[in-house]
Amino acid sequence: MKSQWLFIGLCICTAITSLAQNTTSYWQQHVDYKMEVDVNVKDYTYTGTQELEYTNNSPDTLNQVFYHLFFNAFQPGSDMDVRSRTIKDPDGRVGDRISKLSDKEIGFLKVETLKQNNKELDYKVVGTVLQVNLAQPLLPGEKTKFNMKFNGQVPVQIRRSGRNNAEGVALSMTQWYPKLAEYDFEGWHADPYIGREFQGVWGDFDVKITIDKDYILGGTGYLQNPQEIGYGYEKEGTKVKRKGKKLTWHFNAPQVHDFTWAADPEFVHDSRVAKDGTVLHFLYKDKPAYEKENNFTENWKNLQSKTEDLLLYFNEHIGEYPYDQYSVIQGGDGGMEYAMCTLITGNRSFGSLVGVTAHEMAHAWFQHILATNESKHEWMDEGFTTYISTLAQNEVLSEGKENPLSGAYRGYTYLANSGAEQPQSTHADRYHLNQAYGLAAYSKGAVFLGQLEYLIGKENVSKTLKQYYKEWKFKHPTPNDFKRVAEKVSGAQLDWYLTDWTQTTNTIDYSIENVEAKNQNTVVTLKRNGQMPMPIELRVTFTNGKTQDFYIPLQMMYWQKPNTGELGETWSWANPNYEMTLMLAKDQISKIEIDPSQKMADIKRDNNVFEN
Ligand SMILES: [Zn+2]
């Protein structure tokens, strides 16, 4: 294809867009849990009752339901154990540790009785899933009540949950209760648990946890009886007398899809009211043995104002945090996001402590409030979280990086060139390698948005994120829902981008093939070497040091990015070659570069530059 370039500015018209979204056929299920559990801190067991009111908002009649029994994963021979021992690059935290757990060290969740509207139910435990046949079919629009008695054992800390983690936190209670699986327009999502993503149904949780009175808790939900508990939850200046050997902590959590807590008798509890009114809680060990390694206590004190900065950043750049509370709790085995809280390991450098908090807190928006199905669309959760938390960290820690996402681009480029890449549409549990999952979800997922800036501009991406949150919070959006918002905000057609980037391993590689003097002009030949097409931004640097930018629209976007330089003829995707004539002599040119912003994820950059 040939294109004649002129040094005149062209008018670029953006389409007038409508932001209306058709969600008339949208529905989601609803759960309301009431749980009471009694914990034995000596043998790490607990007993509980659960009353679950389940509302079927689907158009379908349900004859069975599924629950997750996540703790059963921590048993020799479980799917999680076998997966970890057979995958080529096991998670170092898991390895073969599950296979070596004794009966006293394993985790389990056992159902003692289960009734639907007072009728005994027929159920079957299938690993980490409970399959239940209903006594009465649950009709569209109807509610039913399940009553369960259960007991559990907290596993030795292997992954995310457990007792006595590496930093000595007694109880990291995540994924600890029988949890109803998600049923949505795709049907049931009763995935066996192998330690990766999870998905849930929103509803209100009322949870009472009875535990030895010297244990201090943090987690999901608002404490209902702070004056009986104290430990920094009580009204300032009041005194609390804790009665008896055990205390019952009563929490209430409206509109969450999970309930998590952690407990330790040596927790320090600080709180801080952020400018937007959100109460931030911090729970961490009181001068642990590793206190001096990383200035532990000082870091946790300094983290508190940074956490407020992060919250305000996410409020501004995504949308307002809808809960009144968020807690950063020492626990788990790295960092993991939960409803209204995160569990992170705390013995880190200050930068790492802020970084992990930024990432996990950003998940509150993507994993919890938007809540895409992260098993199926892991890149929308981990990738979007990585994108925004990287930008937030750059600002909050004044890192001043010009391209804070460069690490994500490097990760993706490594993956694309490794031969181990699988499409992002692969189920999170089904990657051949943990590394291929990690780089596809986190790095390639963050690049999806970084590169969207290249396609539609930073301002449009920023508007898209806010509009996406506004339209889809508490609705479990799909990849297409995000794409539609980006299309409506920008006016560009992006179906090809979503498809190629997320459902294939097609790569981007453009090169400057030839630069040739012709009469008084210069003919530049560009080539698309990769399968994935893109619009092209090109910078010509002259011998006098001045530069001129050019923009070659991609035909199937039916759109041009504004203010990107001289506009050329469109390039259709099927054509591998593109020729353009610059109306100046070759010896006036010192350099020509494809994508000087480096926001296009070209997997082979060395052929992007011509130097005279
Ligand atoms: Zn994450």
Image: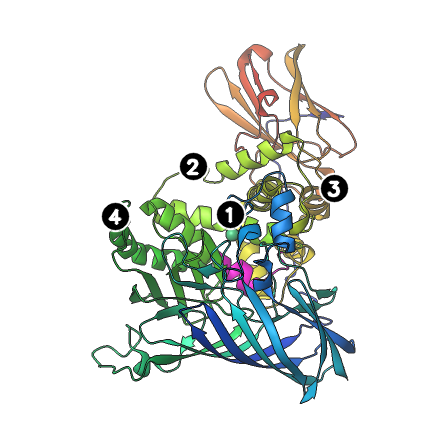
Between tags 1 and 2, which lies in front? 1
Residue 277 visible in the picture = no
Q: Identify the residue position indicated by label 1 in the image.
A: 387
In 3D space, how far apart are the residues under numbered discs 1 and 2 (Cα atoms)? 14 Å
Q: Identify the residue position indicated by label 4 in the image.
A: 295
Assess disc 4: are there few (<14), some (14-19) or many (≥20) residues with their C-alpha within 10 Å of its C-alpha: some
- The residue lying toward the viewer, choosing from 410 and 117, is 117
Q: Is mark 3 within 8 Å of ligand 1?
A: no
Q: Which residues are magenta?
A: 362-374
Above or below 507: residue 224? below
Above or below 382: residue 46? below
Residue at 57% x, 76% y: name it.
150
Q: Kindly identify the amino acid type of the residue bearing the numbered disc 1.
A: Tyr
- SS for callout 1: helix
Q: Identify the residue position indicated by label 2 in the image.
A: 402
- The residue lying toward the viewer, choosing from 160 and 358, is 160
Between tags 3 and 2, which lies in front? 2
Q: In the image, residue 501 lies at what x, y percent?
A: 67, 42
Q: Which quadrant would residue 374 be assigned to in this image? A: bottom right
Proximity of marks 3 and 2: CB atoms separated by less than 8 Å: no
Assess disc 1: are there few (<14), some (14-19) or many (≥20) residues with their C-alpha within 10 Å of its C-alpha: many
